[in-house]
Image (tube, rainbow, N blue to C red):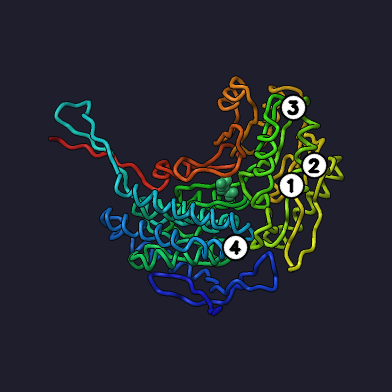
Amino acid sequence: MNELKPNLIGGNWVQGEAIANINPSDQSEVVGYFARASAEDAQTAIAAAKAAFPAWSQSGIMQRHTILRKTADEIMARKDELGALLSREEGKTLAEGIGETVRAAQVFDFFAGEALRLTGQTVPSVRPGIGVEMTREPVGVVGIITPWNFPIAIPAWKIAPALCYGNTVVFKPADLVPGSAWAIVDILHRAGLPDGVLNLVMGKGSVVGQAMVESADMDAISFTGSVGTGGAIARDSAPFMRKLQLEMGGKNPMVILDDADLDVAVDAAVNGAFFSTGQRCTASSRLIVQEGIYDRFVAAAAERLQATQVGHAMDPATHIGPVVDQSQLDQDCRYIETGQSEGARLVWGGNRVQRDTDGFFLTPALFADCTNDMTIAQEEIFGPVAAVIPAKSYDHALDLANDTPFGLSAGICTTSLKHATHFKRNAHAGMVMVNLPTAGVDFHVPFGGRKGSSFGPREQGSYAAEFFTTVKTAYTLA
Ligand code: UN1
Protein backbone atom coordinates (compact mmCIF):
# COMPACT_ATOMS: atom_id res chain seq x y z
CA MET A 1 0.00 0.00 0.00
CA ASN A 2 2.94 2.31 0.58
CA GLU A 3 4.12 2.28 -3.02
CA LEU A 4 6.43 5.08 -4.11
CA LYS A 5 4.36 8.03 -5.37
CA PRO A 6 6.05 9.47 -8.48
CA ASN A 7 6.54 12.95 -9.90
CA LEU A 8 4.43 14.11 -12.84
CA ILE A 9 6.51 15.42 -15.72
CA GLY A 10 5.07 16.11 -19.16
CA GLY A 11 2.09 13.86 -18.40
CA ASN A 12 4.30 10.92 -17.34
CA TRP A 13 4.61 9.58 -13.83
CA VAL A 14 8.36 9.54 -13.17
CA GLN A 15 10.06 7.62 -10.36
CA GLY A 16 13.05 8.74 -8.31
CA GLU A 17 14.87 8.22 -5.03
CA ALA A 18 12.38 7.73 -2.15
CA ILE A 19 11.51 10.40 0.39
CA ALA A 20 9.84 8.99 3.52
CA ASN A 21 7.00 11.22 4.71
CA ILE A 22 7.02 10.92 8.53
CA ASN A 23 4.09 11.71 10.86
CA PRO A 24 5.20 14.42 13.36
CA SER A 25 2.62 13.11 15.87
CA ASP A 26 4.22 9.66 15.72
CA GLN A 27 7.64 9.22 14.19
CA SER A 28 7.12 5.46 13.87
CA GLU A 29 4.47 6.09 11.20
CA VAL A 30 5.51 6.54 7.59
CA VAL A 31 2.67 8.37 5.85
CA GLY A 32 4.03 7.39 2.44
CA TYR A 33 7.04 7.30 0.15
CA PHE A 34 7.46 9.92 -2.54
CA ALA A 35 9.90 10.20 -5.43
CA ARG A 36 12.55 12.87 -5.05
CA ALA A 37 13.09 14.80 -8.29
CA SER A 38 16.56 15.69 -9.53
CA ALA A 39 17.71 18.97 -11.09
CA GLU A 40 17.41 17.25 -14.50
CA ASP A 41 13.82 16.27 -13.71
CA ALA A 42 13.09 19.92 -12.93
CA GLN A 43 14.60 20.95 -16.29
CA THR A 44 12.53 18.33 -18.12
CA ALA A 45 9.42 19.60 -16.31
CA ILE A 46 10.16 23.20 -17.31
CA ALA A 47 10.63 22.14 -20.94
CA ALA A 48 7.33 20.22 -20.81
CA ALA A 49 5.53 23.26 -19.34
CA LYS A 50 7.04 25.46 -22.04
CA ALA A 51 5.94 23.06 -24.79
CA ALA A 52 2.41 22.85 -23.34
CA PHE A 53 2.00 26.62 -23.02
CA PRO A 54 0.94 27.64 -26.56
CA ALA A 55 -2.03 25.26 -26.65
CA TRP A 56 -3.08 25.76 -23.02
CA SER A 57 -2.85 29.54 -23.21
CA GLN A 58 -5.27 29.40 -26.17
CA SER A 59 -7.53 26.77 -24.59
CA GLY A 60 -11.15 27.59 -24.12
CA ILE A 61 -12.42 28.93 -20.83
CA MET A 62 -14.96 26.09 -20.66
CA GLN A 63 -12.16 23.52 -20.59
CA ARG A 64 -10.39 25.37 -17.75
CA HIS A 65 -13.66 25.87 -15.89
CA THR A 66 -14.55 22.19 -16.14
CA ILE A 67 -11.16 20.94 -14.92
CA LEU A 68 -11.06 23.36 -11.97
CA ARG A 69 -14.67 22.57 -11.10
CA LYS A 70 -14.11 18.80 -11.19
CA THR A 71 -11.05 19.25 -8.99
CA ALA A 72 -13.05 21.28 -6.45
CA ASP A 73 -15.77 18.64 -6.39
CA GLU A 74 -13.37 15.74 -5.87
CA ILE A 75 -11.43 17.52 -3.10
CA MET A 76 -14.72 18.32 -1.35
CA ALA A 77 -16.03 14.77 -1.72
CA ARG A 78 -12.77 13.42 -0.23
CA LYS A 79 -12.35 16.10 2.47
CA ASP A 80 -12.23 13.69 5.41
CA GLU A 81 -9.65 11.42 3.80
CA LEU A 82 -7.50 14.29 2.46
CA GLY A 83 -7.83 16.22 5.73
CA ALA A 84 -6.61 13.15 7.62
CA LEU A 85 -3.66 12.76 5.23
CA LEU A 86 -2.80 16.43 5.75
CA SER A 87 -2.96 16.13 9.54
CA ARG A 88 -0.84 12.99 9.47
CA GLU A 89 1.90 14.56 7.39
CA GLU A 90 1.89 18.11 8.87
CA GLY A 91 0.61 17.65 12.42
CA LYS A 92 -2.22 20.18 12.56
CA THR A 93 -5.35 18.81 14.23
CA LEU A 94 -7.81 16.76 12.19
CA ALA A 95 -10.38 19.57 12.40
CA GLU A 96 -7.77 22.01 11.07
CA GLY A 97 -6.71 19.51 8.37
CA ILE A 98 -10.27 19.02 7.15
CA GLY A 99 -10.93 22.77 7.34
CA GLU A 100 -7.87 23.46 5.21
CA THR A 101 -8.95 20.83 2.68
CA VAL A 102 -12.38 22.44 2.37
CA ARG A 103 -10.64 25.77 1.84
CA ALA A 104 -8.64 24.23 -1.03
CA ALA A 105 -11.86 22.97 -2.64
CA GLN A 106 -13.39 26.45 -2.27
CA VAL A 107 -10.34 28.01 -3.94
CA PHE A 108 -10.66 25.69 -6.97
CA ASP A 109 -14.39 26.40 -7.06
CA PHE A 110 -13.75 30.16 -6.98
CA PHE A 111 -11.25 30.04 -9.86
CA ALA A 112 -13.51 27.69 -11.85
CA GLY A 113 -15.94 30.62 -11.73
CA GLU A 114 -13.24 33.18 -12.50
CA ALA A 115 -12.35 31.30 -15.68
CA LEU A 116 -15.84 32.18 -16.97
CA ARG A 117 -15.52 35.80 -15.91
CA LEU A 118 -12.35 36.85 -17.74
CA THR A 119 -12.83 40.43 -18.84
CA GLY A 120 -11.09 43.18 -20.70
CA GLN A 121 -11.91 46.80 -21.41
CA THR A 122 -12.60 48.74 -24.55
CA VAL A 123 -12.10 52.51 -24.54
CA PRO A 124 -11.98 55.19 -27.22
CA SER A 125 -8.56 56.43 -28.23
CA VAL A 126 -7.69 60.09 -27.71
CA ARG A 127 -7.27 60.03 -31.50
CA PRO A 128 -10.61 59.93 -33.38
CA GLY A 129 -11.34 56.77 -35.36
CA ILE A 130 -9.16 54.50 -33.25
CA GLY A 131 -10.30 51.94 -30.69
CA VAL A 132 -8.26 50.71 -27.73
CA GLU A 133 -8.66 47.31 -26.09
CA MET A 134 -7.05 46.21 -22.83
CA THR A 135 -6.89 42.47 -22.30
CA ARG A 136 -5.15 40.09 -19.95
CA GLU A 137 -2.94 37.29 -21.22
CA PRO A 138 -1.23 34.48 -19.31
CA VAL A 139 2.37 35.07 -18.23
CA GLY A 140 3.81 31.75 -19.43
CA VAL A 141 5.58 29.05 -17.42
CA VAL A 142 5.01 29.69 -13.71
CA GLY A 143 7.09 28.10 -10.94
CA ILE A 144 5.13 27.43 -7.76
CA ILE A 145 7.12 26.79 -4.59
CA THR A 146 5.09 26.12 -1.44
CA PRO A 147 5.78 25.72 2.31
CA TRP A 148 4.98 22.85 4.67
CA ASN A 149 2.54 24.66 6.97
CA PHE A 150 -0.47 24.74 4.60
CA PRO A 151 0.14 21.58 2.52
CA ILE A 152 -3.06 21.83 0.46
CA ALA A 153 -4.44 25.39 0.74
CA ILE A 154 -1.34 27.25 -0.42
CA PRO A 155 -0.73 24.95 -3.44
CA ALA A 156 -4.44 25.38 -4.28
CA TRP A 157 -4.38 29.17 -4.09
CA LYS A 158 -1.36 29.35 -6.40
CA ILE A 159 -2.14 26.50 -8.84
CA ALA A 160 -5.84 27.32 -9.34
CA PRO A 161 -5.31 30.91 -10.56
CA ALA A 162 -2.22 29.92 -12.58
CA LEU A 163 -4.30 27.41 -14.57
CA CYS A 164 -7.45 29.56 -14.63
CA TYR A 165 -5.62 32.36 -16.46
CA GLY A 166 -3.92 29.99 -18.94
CA ASN A 167 -0.42 29.52 -17.54
CA THR A 168 1.46 26.24 -17.35
CA VAL A 169 3.01 25.20 -14.05
CA VAL A 170 6.03 23.56 -12.49
CA PHE A 171 5.08 22.85 -8.87
CA LYS A 172 7.57 22.11 -6.09
CA PRO A 173 5.92 21.42 -2.74
CA ALA A 174 7.84 21.44 0.56
CA ASP A 175 9.94 18.33 1.10
CA LEU A 176 8.17 17.63 4.44
CA VAL A 177 4.62 17.40 3.04
CA PRO A 178 4.51 15.74 -0.40
CA GLY A 179 1.30 13.78 0.34
CA SER A 180 -1.29 16.55 -0.01
CA ALA A 181 0.60 18.00 -2.99
CA TRP A 182 0.64 14.65 -4.77
CA ALA A 183 -3.08 14.19 -4.10
CA ILE A 184 -4.10 17.47 -5.72
CA VAL A 185 -1.84 16.94 -8.72
CA ASP A 186 -3.32 13.47 -9.19
CA ILE A 187 -6.84 14.92 -9.00
CA LEU A 188 -6.08 17.70 -11.51
CA HIS A 189 -4.39 15.22 -13.87
CA ARG A 190 -7.41 12.88 -13.82
CA ALA A 191 -9.74 15.87 -14.22
CA GLY A 192 -8.34 16.17 -17.75
CA LEU A 193 -5.39 18.59 -17.76
CA PRO A 194 -3.40 18.16 -20.98
CA ASP A 195 0.11 16.72 -20.61
CA GLY A 196 2.74 19.20 -19.44
CA VAL A 197 0.27 21.84 -18.21
CA LEU A 198 0.93 20.94 -14.57
CA ASN A 199 4.19 19.27 -13.56
CA LEU A 200 5.03 18.02 -10.08
CA VAL A 201 8.66 17.93 -8.95
CA MET A 202 8.96 16.95 -5.29
CA GLY A 203 12.25 17.36 -3.51
CA LYS A 204 14.72 19.76 -1.99
CA GLY A 205 14.67 23.49 -2.46
CA SER A 206 18.44 23.51 -2.85
CA VAL A 207 18.19 21.12 -5.84
CA VAL A 208 14.74 21.36 -7.47
CA GLY A 209 13.92 24.92 -6.38
CA GLN A 210 17.36 26.09 -7.43
CA ALA A 211 17.02 24.49 -10.87
CA MET A 212 13.70 26.31 -11.31
CA VAL A 213 15.14 29.66 -10.26
CA GLU A 214 18.14 29.25 -12.57
CA SER A 215 16.07 28.43 -15.66
CA ALA A 216 15.70 31.15 -18.27
CA ASP A 217 12.42 29.50 -19.33
CA MET A 218 10.73 30.20 -16.01
CA ASP A 219 8.62 33.29 -16.70
CA ALA A 220 7.32 33.84 -13.17
CA ILE A 221 7.73 32.37 -9.69
CA SER A 222 5.16 32.38 -6.90
CA PHE A 223 6.77 31.43 -3.59
CA THR A 224 5.64 31.19 0.03
CA GLY A 225 8.29 30.45 2.65
CA SER A 226 11.12 31.98 4.61
CA VAL A 227 12.52 35.48 4.28
CA GLY A 228 15.96 34.05 3.50
CA THR A 229 14.78 31.87 0.63
CA GLY A 230 12.49 34.61 -0.72
CA GLY A 231 15.43 37.02 -0.83
CA ALA A 232 17.62 34.45 -2.59
CA ILE A 233 14.90 33.84 -5.21
CA ALA A 234 14.66 37.59 -5.83
CA ARG A 235 18.43 37.97 -6.21
CA ASP A 236 18.79 34.93 -8.49
CA SER A 237 15.79 36.04 -10.56
CA ALA A 238 17.16 39.52 -11.24
CA PRO A 239 19.11 38.56 -14.40
CA PHE A 240 15.90 37.15 -15.90
CA MET A 241 13.65 40.11 -14.94
CA ARG A 242 10.89 37.61 -14.24
CA LYS A 243 7.67 38.30 -12.37
CA LEU A 244 7.82 37.40 -8.69
CA GLN A 245 5.25 36.91 -5.97
CA LEU A 246 6.97 36.27 -2.63
CA GLU A 247 5.07 35.65 0.60
CA MET A 248 7.46 35.45 3.49
CA GLY A 249 7.47 35.95 7.23
CA GLY A 250 5.37 37.79 9.74
CA LYS A 251 5.67 39.07 13.30
CA ASN A 252 2.06 40.04 13.55
CA PRO A 253 0.91 42.37 16.32
CA MET A 254 -2.36 41.93 18.18
CA VAL A 255 -3.18 45.09 20.11
CA ILE A 256 -5.47 44.66 23.12
CA LEU A 257 -6.84 47.91 24.51
CA ASP A 258 -8.24 48.54 28.01
CA ASP A 259 -11.76 48.72 26.59
CA ALA A 260 -11.56 45.31 24.85
CA ASP A 261 -14.02 42.55 25.66
CA LEU A 262 -11.68 40.24 27.61
CA ASP A 263 -13.20 36.99 26.29
CA VAL A 264 -13.00 38.20 22.68
CA ALA A 265 -9.38 39.26 23.23
CA VAL A 266 -8.34 35.96 24.82
CA ASP A 267 -10.08 33.99 22.05
CA ALA A 268 -8.39 36.04 19.34
CA ALA A 269 -4.97 35.91 20.97
CA VAL A 270 -4.94 32.20 21.85
CA ASN A 271 -6.32 31.15 18.47
CA GLY A 272 -4.09 33.57 16.57
CA ALA A 273 -0.90 32.76 18.45
CA PHE A 274 -1.17 29.03 19.07
CA PHE A 275 -3.63 27.26 16.78
CA SER A 276 -1.99 25.33 13.96
CA THR A 277 0.83 25.10 16.55
CA GLY A 278 1.72 28.75 15.85
CA GLN A 279 3.10 27.63 12.50
CA ARG A 280 1.42 30.31 10.40
CA CYS A 281 3.02 33.36 8.86
CA THR A 282 -0.13 35.17 10.03
CA ALA A 283 0.27 34.04 13.68
CA SER A 284 -0.45 36.66 16.38
CA SER A 285 3.04 36.37 17.84
CA ARG A 286 3.21 39.82 19.49
CA LEU A 287 0.41 40.56 21.95
CA ILE A 288 0.59 44.29 22.71
CA VAL A 289 -1.57 44.89 25.78
CA GLN A 290 -2.57 48.18 27.40
CA GLU A 291 -1.70 48.60 31.09
CA GLY A 292 -5.26 48.72 32.47
CA ILE A 293 -6.18 45.23 31.15
CA TYR A 294 -2.66 43.77 31.20
CA ASP A 295 -2.79 41.65 34.38
CA ARG A 296 -6.32 40.39 33.71
CA PHE A 297 -5.40 39.49 30.11
CA VAL A 298 -2.21 37.62 31.05
CA ALA A 299 -4.03 35.67 33.80
CA ALA A 300 -6.97 34.80 31.52
CA ALA A 301 -4.74 33.78 28.60
CA ALA A 302 -2.62 31.56 30.88
CA GLU A 303 -5.77 29.97 32.28
CA ARG A 304 -7.03 29.28 28.76
CA LEU A 305 -3.70 27.71 27.79
CA GLN A 306 -3.78 25.43 30.84
CA ALA A 307 -7.00 24.00 29.43
CA THR A 308 -5.57 23.39 25.93
CA GLN A 309 -4.53 19.86 25.09
CA VAL A 310 -1.32 19.31 23.15
CA GLY A 311 -1.22 15.93 21.51
CA HIS A 312 -1.57 13.63 18.52
CA ALA A 313 -3.17 15.49 15.61
CA MET A 314 -5.72 12.70 15.07
CA ASP A 315 -6.90 12.61 18.71
CA PRO A 316 -10.27 14.43 18.88
CA ALA A 317 -9.32 15.83 22.33
CA THR A 318 -6.27 17.65 20.89
CA HIS A 319 -6.39 21.42 20.44
CA ILE A 320 -2.76 21.88 19.41
CA GLY A 321 -0.86 19.28 17.40
CA PRO A 322 2.90 18.69 17.35
CA VAL A 323 5.63 20.88 15.91
CA VAL A 324 6.38 19.78 12.35
CA ASP A 325 9.84 18.23 12.84
CA GLN A 326 12.94 18.03 14.99
CA SER A 327 14.75 21.01 13.53
CA GLN A 328 11.71 23.26 13.94
CA LEU A 329 11.30 22.00 17.52
CA ASP A 330 14.97 22.73 18.25
CA GLN A 331 14.52 26.23 16.85
CA ASP A 332 11.41 26.85 19.00
CA CYS A 333 13.28 25.65 22.12
CA ARG A 334 16.26 27.91 21.34
CA TYR A 335 13.92 30.91 21.10
CA ILE A 336 12.28 29.95 24.41
CA GLU A 337 15.74 29.89 26.06
CA THR A 338 16.63 33.22 24.45
CA GLY A 339 13.38 34.74 25.75
CA GLN A 340 14.24 33.67 29.28
CA SER A 341 17.85 34.82 29.08
CA GLU A 342 16.78 38.24 27.75
CA GLY A 343 14.50 38.71 30.79
CA ALA A 344 11.01 37.87 29.49
CA ARG A 345 8.76 36.13 32.06
CA LEU A 346 7.58 32.68 30.96
CA VAL A 347 4.01 32.60 32.31
CA TRP A 348 2.97 29.26 30.84
CA GLY A 349 4.24 26.39 28.72
CA GLY A 350 7.35 26.09 26.62
CA ASN A 351 7.97 22.49 27.73
CA ARG A 352 8.58 19.42 25.64
CA VAL A 353 5.98 16.88 26.69
CA GLN A 354 5.66 13.11 26.20
CA ARG A 355 2.53 11.48 24.88
CA ASP A 356 1.72 7.86 23.99
CA THR A 357 3.36 8.29 20.61
CA ASP A 358 6.79 9.65 19.77
CA GLY A 359 5.93 13.12 18.42
CA PHE A 360 7.33 16.65 18.60
CA PHE A 361 5.03 17.90 21.36
CA LEU A 362 5.64 21.33 22.87
CA THR A 363 3.26 23.17 25.21
CA PRO A 364 2.33 26.68 24.00
CA ALA A 365 4.73 29.23 25.48
CA LEU A 366 3.32 32.53 26.73
CA PHE A 367 5.94 35.14 27.63
CA ALA A 368 4.89 38.30 29.54
CA ASP A 369 6.76 41.53 30.38
CA CYS A 370 8.54 41.56 27.03
CA THR A 371 9.98 44.60 25.33
CA ASN A 372 9.60 45.00 21.60
CA ASP A 373 13.37 44.93 21.05
CA MET A 374 13.76 41.42 22.50
CA THR A 375 14.71 38.71 20.02
CA ILE A 376 11.42 36.85 20.61
CA ALA A 377 9.51 40.05 19.71
CA GLN A 378 11.53 40.80 16.59
CA GLU A 379 12.24 37.49 14.84
CA GLU A 380 9.68 35.12 13.37
CA ILE A 381 9.75 31.94 15.47
CA PHE A 382 7.13 29.98 13.50
CA GLY A 383 6.10 27.95 16.53
CA PRO A 384 3.77 28.07 19.55
CA VAL A 385 5.51 31.01 21.24
CA ALA A 386 3.98 34.45 21.89
CA ALA A 387 5.39 37.60 23.50
CA VAL A 388 3.13 39.86 25.58
CA ILE A 389 4.35 43.46 25.45
CA PRO A 390 2.87 46.14 27.73
CA ALA A 391 1.72 49.46 26.21
CA LYS A 392 0.85 52.71 27.99
CA SER A 393 -1.76 54.00 25.55
CA TYR A 394 -3.34 53.39 22.15
CA ASP A 395 -0.71 55.57 20.46
CA HIS A 396 2.09 53.68 22.18
CA ALA A 397 0.51 50.35 21.16
CA LEU A 398 0.25 51.47 17.53
CA ASP A 399 3.92 52.54 17.51
CA LEU A 400 4.94 49.15 18.92
CA ALA A 401 2.70 47.33 16.42
CA ASN A 402 4.41 49.06 13.51
CA ASP A 403 7.94 48.72 14.93
CA THR A 404 8.84 45.53 13.05
CA PRO A 405 10.54 44.66 9.78
CA PHE A 406 7.40 42.71 8.79
CA GLY A 407 3.93 43.86 7.70
CA LEU A 408 1.67 40.93 6.92
CA SER A 409 -1.29 41.06 9.31
CA ALA A 410 -2.16 43.26 12.31
CA GLY A 411 -5.01 42.95 14.79
CA ILE A 412 -6.75 45.06 17.41
CA CYS A 413 -9.22 44.10 20.12
CA THR A 414 -11.25 47.10 21.21
CA THR A 415 -14.85 48.25 21.61
CA SER A 416 -13.88 51.75 20.47
CA LEU A 417 -14.94 52.60 16.93
CA LYS A 418 -12.48 55.49 16.96
CA HIS A 419 -9.47 53.32 17.75
CA ALA A 420 -10.56 50.49 15.46
CA THR A 421 -10.97 52.92 12.57
CA HIS A 422 -7.66 54.64 13.25
CA PHE A 423 -5.87 51.29 13.50
CA LYS A 424 -7.34 50.04 10.21
CA ARG A 425 -5.95 53.14 8.50
CA ASN A 426 -2.58 53.32 10.24
CA ALA A 427 -1.38 49.76 10.81
CA HIS A 428 1.53 49.09 8.43
CA ALA A 429 0.24 45.72 7.29
CA GLY A 430 -1.43 44.16 4.27
CA MET A 431 -4.30 42.79 6.35
CA VAL A 432 -5.99 44.21 9.46
CA MET A 433 -8.28 42.31 11.81
CA VAL A 434 -10.63 43.92 14.35
CA ASN A 435 -11.62 41.68 17.28
CA LEU A 436 -10.36 38.68 15.30
CA PRO A 437 -7.12 36.67 15.25
CA THR A 438 -4.47 37.91 12.79
CA ALA A 439 -4.61 34.45 11.16
CA GLY A 440 -7.49 32.73 9.41
CA VAL A 441 -8.30 34.42 6.13
CA ASP A 442 -11.05 34.18 3.52
CA PHE A 443 -10.31 32.57 0.16
CA HIS A 444 -11.99 35.14 -2.10
CA VAL A 445 -10.23 38.37 -1.09
CA PRO A 446 -6.62 39.54 -1.46
CA PHE A 447 -3.93 38.05 0.76
CA GLY A 448 -0.52 39.60 1.28
CA GLY A 449 1.59 42.05 3.22
CA ARG A 450 4.03 44.93 3.17
CA LYS A 451 7.63 45.61 4.14
CA GLY A 452 9.68 42.43 4.69
CA SER A 453 6.63 40.15 4.53
CA SER A 454 5.70 40.25 0.87
CA PHE A 455 6.92 41.25 -2.55
CA GLY A 456 4.82 41.48 -5.69
CA PRO A 457 1.07 41.47 -6.29
CA ARG A 458 -1.46 40.03 -3.84
CA GLU A 459 -2.61 36.43 -3.89
CA GLN A 460 -6.20 35.11 -3.89
CA GLY A 461 -9.53 36.39 -5.07
CA SER A 462 -9.78 38.26 -8.35
CA TYR A 463 -6.57 40.17 -7.40
CA ALA A 464 -4.67 36.99 -8.27
CA ALA A 465 -5.00 38.09 -11.92
CA GLU A 466 -2.45 40.85 -11.25
CA PHE A 467 0.30 38.28 -10.91
CA PHE A 468 -0.91 35.46 -13.13
CA THR A 469 -1.66 37.63 -16.17
CA THR A 470 0.05 40.37 -18.10
CA VAL A 471 -1.90 43.25 -19.63
CA LYS A 472 -1.99 43.94 -23.36
CA THR A 473 -3.13 47.25 -24.88
CA ALA A 474 -4.21 46.95 -28.53
CA TYR A 475 -4.98 49.92 -30.84
CA THR A 476 -7.11 49.48 -33.98
CA LEU A 477 -7.82 51.98 -36.74
CA ALA A 478 -11.51 51.45 -37.39
C1 UN1 B 1 -4.31 31.94 7.27
O1 UN1 B 1 -3.91 32.57 8.25
O2 UN1 B 1 -5.48 31.55 7.18
O3 UN1 B 1 1.94 30.56 5.45
C2 UN1 B 1 -3.47 31.61 6.11
C3 UN1 B 1 1.04 31.13 6.03
C4 UN1 B 1 0.14 32.00 5.20
C5 UN1 B 1 -1.24 31.51 5.15
C6 UN1 B 1 -2.03 31.90 6.33
N1 UN1 B 1 0.67 32.14 3.87
O4 UN1 B 1 0.86 30.97 7.22
Mark 2: amino acid? Phe
Q: Distance between the residues labelled 4 and 3?
A: 44 Å
Q: Residue 385 carries which label?
A: 1
Mark 3 touches mark 2? (CB < 8 Å): no
Q: Do the residues labelled 1 and 3 touch (CB within 8 Å)?
A: no
Q: In which quarter of the image is the C terminus?
A: top left
**Could you tell me which secondary element the residue under label 1 belongs to?**
strand
Q: Distance between the residues labelled 4 and 2?
A: 35 Å
Which residue is rendered at x = 69% and y = 68% of the image?
26
Q: Are marks 2 and 1 in contact (CB under 8 Å)?
A: yes
* Residue highlighted by disc 4: 206
Q: Are marks 4 and 2 in contact (CB under 8 Å)?
A: no
Q: Where is residue 68 in the image (x, y as percent from the top left)?
A: 36, 57
Say whether mark 2 is within 8 Å of ligand 1: no
Q: Residue at x 27, y 55 (%)?
A: 62
| Residue located beneath label 2 in the image | 367
Q: Does the beta carbon of the residue at mark 3 sit less than 8 Å from ligand 1?
A: no
Counting residues from the start of the chain, the first of labels 1 and 3 encountered is 3
